[in-house]
Image (cartoon, coloured by chain):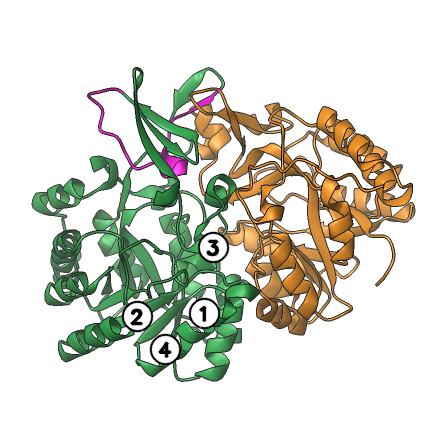
């Protein structure tokens, strides 16, 4: 996957939870926008979010007229009782001519690749492929054409995978950070009965309570205390791996702090590795978020492409990204070995 | 495929020293267990037992008539981990349990098992794996009895279904070592602190509710799942194998209780009570089986005769 003479032009893949978000992503320089349908076939199955058939058509037309691609995420794991919804979603993806289908479940991939051989397939991050043999499995069996890597690999490991992967790689650049390997985290269903795999949501809003007490503001998930805040502390959404818990005598962020992934400083390295695309997380976020983040990343990718040797993230980019980050802080995550 | 379900023992999820591990399996060899899954599945840095040590244990168990399956790592990132996986998958003496799709890729064409971390959520997925050589699959732990019933109705007759019926639930895997983190140690210099926690390190809420267990890069439930009260349903659904996940204490006794419940018409309510007393801290749960939150506990309402 390495490029030596030609500069590797990394594509910018941006999220959209609704049509206004899709439009601002397109208008501000996304190379591709990814969306989901209004049900549990995708991993951002939130109330008021996502696209029906008509909105999808409008979005695809808007993007295609402006040279931008549209991907569809069907990246949850269907069970027999709900299979028909996933099948219909794949059928609709082919009918509407999405530029790629982002899928995880081997049943969904099997159906899509055998029924619609011309439909381009990407392996979702929920497919949990963290090494080249896993990627080969999906490539040989379903002819996937790109893999989105889970956010658990170090930069060196990404490089190793990139060197021997049969297909181009997409990596997460910015947004909420899963500390667990995606597609194999059941913490949410353990507490709420609904997980990203089964329901398309982690720590679903229907299970969340914010309770004011004498000891401060409590955030609860299906009555489990996730965190407790003093009056002067900003409270975070109770994603269950990002609460403060007791281990031994200490109370701390035992699993992960509420923080966002930001790899903008790593662009030259990712470019040199031959990474095909940078993914921005956040289909659940507002069009304003999508606009700001798309602008910053477009500028950063253009700058890196022009002159990767002298590339330095601009202070203003960093400020903008910090301002829209979870917990108003960012991390290099697993890319940076000491974080692990 | 009829008859009484077999009992299996999942790979030890924790890091125990070598003599403890050998002692443990010596006791297991004297138990009524039918199938034993062996190997390190959580962290590739845990090397007190090398491949040859595991094979020694495997041969000892095989010599007393146990079926042995070698289990592969769950989260595979580094090239060194791929190399170890390749050599494991090349061996033909024992069947291998795949815990990552990389293992499925390397095992295709010969008989293999998929462990609970392989996402087999629907009949089409199972069929696809059967075409590649799958002989046995373990139900992903978050799936319910309804999901299992649908799978059982559509699967080929000769494919075995295994369900985890007892033990702390494996819930998540990460690049980060949470045990090292809790000791303020970097993962690269973890000092093997997980050796100090033979049943994992308890994580509680700020209200002191026992919530999760940190086991290196793995997160488990603090509660022990226990499906003994659903035994008749499991049998009706033609589950072939009941899987028990080891705990540091009492594992042979736990095996014995399940064996007697299966073979000797042992009173389920009594068996259930005995199991409660053998669990590590945290209590018990069975919610996933009923399609609810995994941590929930459905009480036994009706006691089969």
Measured in 3D between alpha carbons, the distance from the residue under mark 3 to the one under mark 2, in whole angstroms, is: 19 Å
Residue B275 relative to residue B294: left or right: right
Measured in 3D between alpha carbons, the distance from the residue under mark 2 to the one under mark 1, in whole angstroms, is: 16 Å
Within 10 Å of the Cα at label 3, are there few (<14), some (14-19), or many (20+) other Cα atoms?
many
Whether labels 2 and 1 belong to a single chain: the reply is yes
In the rendered structure, the residue with mark 1 lies on which chain? A
Q: Marks 3 and 2: CB-CB under 8 Å?
A: no
Chain A shade in the render: green
Name the chief secondary structure element in magenta. loop
Query: Residue A233 colored magenta?
Result: yes
Q: Nearer the viewer, mark 2 or mark 1?
A: 1
Does label 2 or label 4 sit earlier along the sequence? 2
Residue under the point 60% across and 23% down: B196
Query: Residue A73 colored magenta?
Result: no
Residue pushed farthest front?
A: B302
In the rendered structure, the residue with mark 3 lies on which chain? A
Residue beneath label 1, please? A86
Please state, as top left, top right, bottom left or bottom right, where the C terminus of chain B lies in the image.
Answer: top right
Residue beneath label 3, please? A197
Measured in 3D between alpha carbons, the distance from the residue under mark 4 to the one under mark 3, in whole angstroms, is: 21 Å
Does label 3 or label 2 sit earlier along the sequence? 2
Q: Is residue B295 above or below residue A20?
A: above
* Disc ID at residue A71: 2
Q: Nearer the viewer, mark 2 or mark 4?
A: 4
Q: What x and y, as percent, mark residue A149?
A: 39, 57
Q: Is residue A314 above or below residue A237?
A: below
Q: Marks 2 and 4: CB-CB under 8 Å?
A: no
Q: Which residues are magenta?
A: A230-247
| Residue B34 in view of the camera | yes
């Amino acid at each position: 996957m390495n490029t030596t003479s030609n500069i590797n032009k990394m594509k910018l893949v941006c999220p959209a939870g609704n049509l206004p978000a899709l439009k601002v992503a397109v208008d501000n320089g996304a190379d591709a926008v990814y969306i989901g349908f209004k049900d549990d076939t995708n991993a951002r199955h939130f109330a008021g979010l996502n696209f029906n058939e008509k909105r999808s058509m409008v979005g695809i037309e808007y993007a295609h007229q402006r040279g931008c691609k549209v991907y569809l995420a069907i990246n949850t794991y269907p069970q027999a009782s709900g299979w028909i919804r996933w099948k219909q979603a794949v059928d609709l993806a082919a009918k509407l001519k999405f530029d790629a289908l982002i899928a995880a479940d081997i049943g969904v991939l099997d159906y899509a690749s055998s029924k619609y051989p011309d439909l381009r397939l990407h392996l979702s991050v929920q497919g949990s492929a963290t090494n080249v043999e896993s990627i080969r499995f999906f490539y040989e069996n379903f002819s996937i054409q790109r893999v989105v890597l889970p956010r658990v690999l170090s930069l060196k490991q990404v490089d190793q995978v990139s060197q021997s992967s049969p297909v181009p790689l997409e990596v997460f650049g910015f947004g909420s950070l899963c500390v667990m390997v995606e597609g194999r985290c059941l913490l949410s269903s353990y507490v709420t009965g609904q997980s990203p795999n089964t329901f398309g949501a982690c720590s679903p809003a229907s299970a969340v309570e914010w309770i004011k007490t004498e000891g401060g503001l409590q955030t609860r998930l299906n009555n489990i205390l996730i965190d407790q805040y003093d009056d002067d502390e900003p409270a975070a959404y109770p994603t269950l791996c990002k609460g403060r818990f007791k281990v031994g005598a200490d109370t701390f962020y035992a699993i992960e702090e509420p923080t966002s992934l930001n790899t903008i400083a790593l662009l030259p390295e990712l470019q040199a590795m031959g990474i095909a695309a940078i993914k921005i997380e956040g289909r659940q976020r507002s069009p304003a978020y999508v606009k700001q983040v798309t602008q910053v990343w477009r500028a950063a990718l253009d700058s890196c492409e022009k002159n990767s040797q002298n590339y330095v993230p601009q202070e203003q980019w960093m400020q903008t990204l910090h301002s829209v980050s979870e917990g108003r802080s960012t991390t290099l995550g697993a890319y940076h070995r000491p974080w692990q | 495929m009829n008859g009484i379900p077999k009992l299996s023992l999942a790979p030890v999820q924790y890091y125990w020293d070598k003599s403890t591990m050998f002692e443990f399996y010596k006791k297991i060899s004297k138990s009524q267990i039918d199938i034993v899954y062996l190997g390190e599945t959580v962290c590739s840095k845990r090397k007190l037992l090398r491949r040859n040590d595991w094979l020694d244990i495997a041969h000892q168990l095989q010599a007393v008539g146990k079926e042995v399956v070698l289990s592969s790592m769950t989260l595979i990132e580094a090239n060194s981990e791929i190399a170890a996986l390749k050599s494991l998958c090349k061996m033909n003496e024992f069947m291998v349990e795949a815990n990552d799709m990389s293992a499925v890729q390397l095992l295709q064409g010969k008989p293999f098992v998929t462990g609970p971390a392989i996402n087999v959520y629907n009949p089409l997925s199972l069929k696809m794996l059967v075409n590649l050589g799958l002989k046995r699959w373990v139900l992903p732990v978050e799936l319910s009895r309804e999901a299992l019933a649908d799978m059982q109705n559509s699967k080929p007759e000769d494919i075995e279904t295994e369900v985890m019926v007892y033990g702390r639930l494996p819930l998540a895997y990460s690049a980060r070592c949470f045990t090292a983190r809790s000791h303020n140690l970097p993962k690269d210099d973890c000092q093997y602190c997980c050796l100090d926690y033979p049943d994992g390190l308890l994580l509680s809420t700020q209200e002191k509710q026992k919530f999760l267990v940190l086991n290196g890069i793995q997160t488990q439930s603090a509660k022990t799942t226990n499906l003994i009260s659903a035994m008749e349903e499991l049998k009706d659904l033609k589950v072939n194998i009941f899987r028990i996940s080891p705990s540091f204490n009492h594992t042979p006794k736990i095996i014995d209780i399940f064996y007697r419940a299966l073979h000797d018409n042992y009173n389920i309510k009594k068996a259930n009570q005995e199991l409660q007393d053998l669990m590590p801290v945290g209590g018990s749960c069975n919610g996933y089986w009923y399609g609810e939150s995994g941590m929930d506990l459905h009480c036994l309402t009706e006691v089969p005769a």
